[in-house]
Image: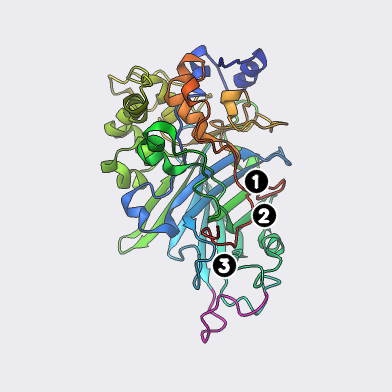
Amino acid sequence: MELRISRRVLIALGTAGVVTASSLALLRAETGVASSHREAPMIAGDPRNDNTDVYAFVSPDKPDTVTLMANFIPFEEPTGGPNFYQFDTGSRYSIKIDSNGDARPDVTYEWTFRNEDRRNTGTFLYDNGPVTSLNDKNLLLRQRYTLKRITPGGVRTLVSNGVVAPSDTGPASMPDYAGLRAQSIRSLPGGGKAFAGQADEAFFADLRVFDLLYGGNLSEVGRDTLKGYNVHSLALQVPKREVALRADARRNPVIGVWSTVDKWSPRGYVQVSRLGQPLVNEVVVPAGLKDAFNALPPRNDADVPAVVKRVTEPEVPRLLEAIYGLKAPKTPRNDLVEIFLTGIAKANGPIKADLNSQSLNKDAGRLRPSEMLRLNMSIPPAANPNRLGVLAGDLQGFPNGRRLGDDVVDIALQAMAGAGQTGKLVDALAAGDKVDQNDKPFTTRFPYIPLPGHASVNAG
């Protein structure tokens, strides 16, 4: 099957800067196979601080805004009581935005959490009767949050006493969970909304990819491994002007987005989790560097030769060749440098980087090579989104930011096998992992992510 990219696509891409033929291929380059669930040894033992996914997209129902989302706590079993799930009160959770390509955050949205005193310590229950509102006396444990917007110009508190939407303990306890979520959404000064709470695990994939890439013969596909699980989500919807700063909407609408968690320790706050593009730490970064990568700021990415090498000489194409006989593209994969470290749009890339010199260790104008999710805010929402995003000509999709419905698994499998370079889909991988959408539909309004489930994953 041939990939057909129309003149309209080329014109639309041009709004982000100069686009060359090679840049068009780079839009389909290797950007990850799945989300970062349990991606590094240390964070795998600390799920409350484990960032599973980051999303950034122009809001479909409010195209003058962007929606930013970071999810945490992988594989929440809905019936995992009696304590259920909550954010870490000893950590700072952040979504960070680079608006000029220097790999430093120009805007940081930071959440901190505190627990209210438990209303009844004489019972093991999370709630001891139907909960009809966030103020219901039957809800025995509430978590509150403070949300701040931090820029070089100062700190502004956007929400001082927000209430986290509780874990869904079941239809008897919470007969109208949608109403509880609606009560938890806060309006922000200057426009926008904020949400913190439990949600459906919106990432969809067959994670048997880790069993020698789907069983060594593509027999282990077609099962959404994450079906039925929940996560804890932090979501924002903000006007584009709030995150553009120097990257104004006409001259340079591109922003870089990533999320971090800083956890309190005897040494003060220490960064323990980092996530931008899906699966970079999980599959691209080797085991010996995974914990270090979680602590690394994007500013320092290009200073780590081993990280650069894993981009230019990735492991997954070699595995595809060894297991399935699909010839790996030649290395070094200089094409992947743009998608991982520089981006394709003005002020977030591209640059001419000589990998045999020290150019990656220096700024190229304002640009600093770094790994993050990049979003061109000038591209409007697609009337009919395609799960394959840019690969299928839908420029509002992954890897231009990331929407909830983008099938990053199938996109990346094709790219790793060389579709991004040749312009042709690899027929042997045409079916991908046969998990093409989430088990629950996404909503049409903020925060878009489905409500959490309350049935046991093992219900049958």
First in sequence: mark 2 vs mark 3: 3
Q: Secondary structure at mark 2?
A: loop
First in sequence: mark 1 vs mark 2: 2
Q: Is residue 143 left or right of residue 328?
A: right
Q: Secondary structure at mark 3?
A: strand
Q: Are marks 2 and 3 in contact (CB under 8 Å)?
A: no
Query: Which residue was labeled with disc 3?
Result: 144
Query: Which residue was labeled with disc 2?
Result: 188
* Kind of residue sitting beneath label 3: Arg
Which corner quadrant holds the N terminus? top right
Query: Which residue was labeled with disc 1?
Result: 238
Query: Residue most toward the left?
Result: 288
In the figure, residue 46 lies in which quadrant?
A: bottom left
* Kind of residue sitting beneath label 1: Val
* Kind of residue sitting beneath label 2: Leu
- Residue 354 included in the magenta stretch of the image: no
First in sequence: mark 1 vs mark 3: 3
Q: Are marks 1 and 2 in contact (CB under 8 Å)?
A: yes
Q: Is residue 58 left or right of residue 264?
A: right
- How was this image coloured? rainbow
Residue at 43% x, 60% y: name it. Answer: 91
In the figure, residue 325 lies in which quadrant?
A: top left
Main SS of residues in magenta: loop
Any part of residue 181 in sight: yes
* Residue nearest the viewer, comparing 21 with 264: 21
- In space, the residues marked 1 and 2 are separated at their CA atoms by 8 Å
Residue at 45% x, 36% y: name it. Answer: 33
Q: Which residues are magenta?
A: 116-130
Q: Which numbered circle lies on residue 251?
A: none
Question: Disc 2 or disc 3, which is closer to the eye?
Answer: 3
Q: Secondary structure at mark 1?
A: strand
* Residue nearest the viewer, comparing 14 with 395: 395
